[in-house]
Image (cartoon, rainbow, N blue to C red):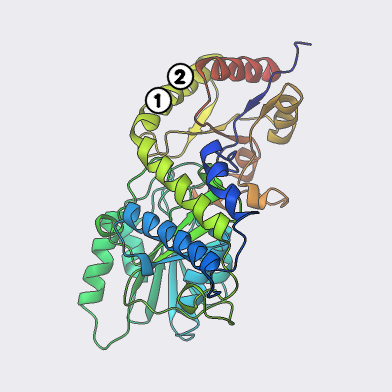
Amino acid sequence: MPKPIDIYLDYAAATPMDDRVFAAMQPYLKQLFYNPSATYLAARSVAKALQQARGNVAQLLGARPPEIIFTAGGTEANNLAIHGVMRQYPAANVVVSAIEHESVLAPAGRYDCRVAPVDKHGMVDVARLAELIDDQTILVSVMYANNEVGTIQPIKELAQLIKQKRAGRAGDMPLVFHTDAAQAANYLDLQVARLGVDLLTLNGGKMYGAKQSGVLYVRSGIQLQPLVDGGGQERGYRSGTENVAAAIGFATALTIAQAQRHTETKRLQTLQRQFIEGIHVAVPTVLLNGHATKRLPNNVHLTFPGIDNERLLMQLDEHGIMAAAGSACSASSEQPSHVLAALGMSDEYAQSSLRFSMWLQTSESDIAATIAAIARFIA
């Protein structure tokens, strides 16, 4: 048996913290521990640092600082977006895509929820989604890029559709557009005006920041009902003493991610092509899932017909190669992935599928070693 190697290919689930992020956070974990709501000078300096972090995030999104709400990760941000709108209009309906993250599907499912289908590549059916929007639709939520198969959605096109629907409405019922961009920050444009969104979710733990750090962008004029009442922090949307270290770390991580996204996208696309072409040679029966071109550059999602994905995953793990059989948030579920089911994939094929997601330090030799190991285990 060859000596185990150490190749991590599950960066869609979790990323290591960048040293620069850790360095930015460290002072606020111990020395500068003060409550930013306090009035003495030391606390006011912490409050100033928090507002600077908020301003940095706002600039990167093309937003205003008051439109940035710091949260404890993407799940909370998604819940605040869905519940924050829907609790104000409990008789209204919400439209979501069939491949949303569980943190969108679960809260949306508590209301009159309409699900827009996707095609076999994971691309939302824009025409069908348009049909689902009626005069009682208050919220539409479509993720920017899928966390399992990597398909990138036409957010700008959807924003134009929603703008048209909004203009053609009678009465004053709002129509709010939310996108979960948790997987997008490392590779895609986040300028909210260009995207045309009203609410946008980001997750620090997906871009080399701290876990349980996140942001919900809330466009000026959009009203939400808070999930947590209390001291009125974060414009009243998230009461409780602010996690200053997490906010500063998030701002640092987002700055780094957006600064290097063009060069890193190009590099990862080269590795992605190497992986896809190489695995088709090594395992001719393999199938690529997701869109062929409109996909995240770090994502390779594959089906190996007739192969049990859990067994292959364990064999790879024993060899020091870490991948995933689906979303980390639903890894404990024995049910096949709802994303793959929405693509029209059978349960049998879904249980023969694995996701590989790369990062900054993934190399050509890592990809070659992974392909060789997969071919050997399948053979």
Question: Picture coordinates of residue 345 (x, y %)?
Answer: 54, 44
Question: Picture coordinates of residue 364 (x, y %)?
Answer: 50, 16
* Residue at 23 percent of width and 62 percent of height: 160
Disc 1 marks a residue whose amino acid type is Arg
Question: Picture coordinates of residue 278 (x, y %)?
Answer: 50, 17
Earlier-in-chain disc, 1 versus 2: 1
* Residue at 56 percent of width and 74 percent of height: 38
For the C terminus, the image quarter is top right
Residue corresponding to mark 2: 274
Q: Is residue 35 above or below residue 270?
A: below
Disc 2 marks a residue whose amino acid type is Gln
* Residue closest to the eye, 263 or 272: 263
Question: Picture coordinates of residue 336 (x, y %)?
Answer: 65, 48
Which quadrant of the structure image shows residue 302? top right
Which quadrant of the structure image shows residue 310? top right
Provide the secondary structure element on which disc 2 rests. helix
* Residue at 70 percent of width and 33 percent of height: 308
Proximity of marks 1 and 2: CB atoms separated by less than 8 Å: no
Provide the secondary structure element on which disc 1 rests. helix
Measure how far apart labels 1 and 2 are at the Cα level.
11 Å
* Residue at 32 percent of width and 73 percent of height: 220
Dot 1: few (<14), some (14–19), or many (≥20) neighbours within 10 Å?
some
Which residue, as the protein is rendered here, is positioned at the far right?
A: 1
Which residue, as the protein is rendered here, is positioned at the far front?
A: 41
Residue corresponding to mark 1: 267
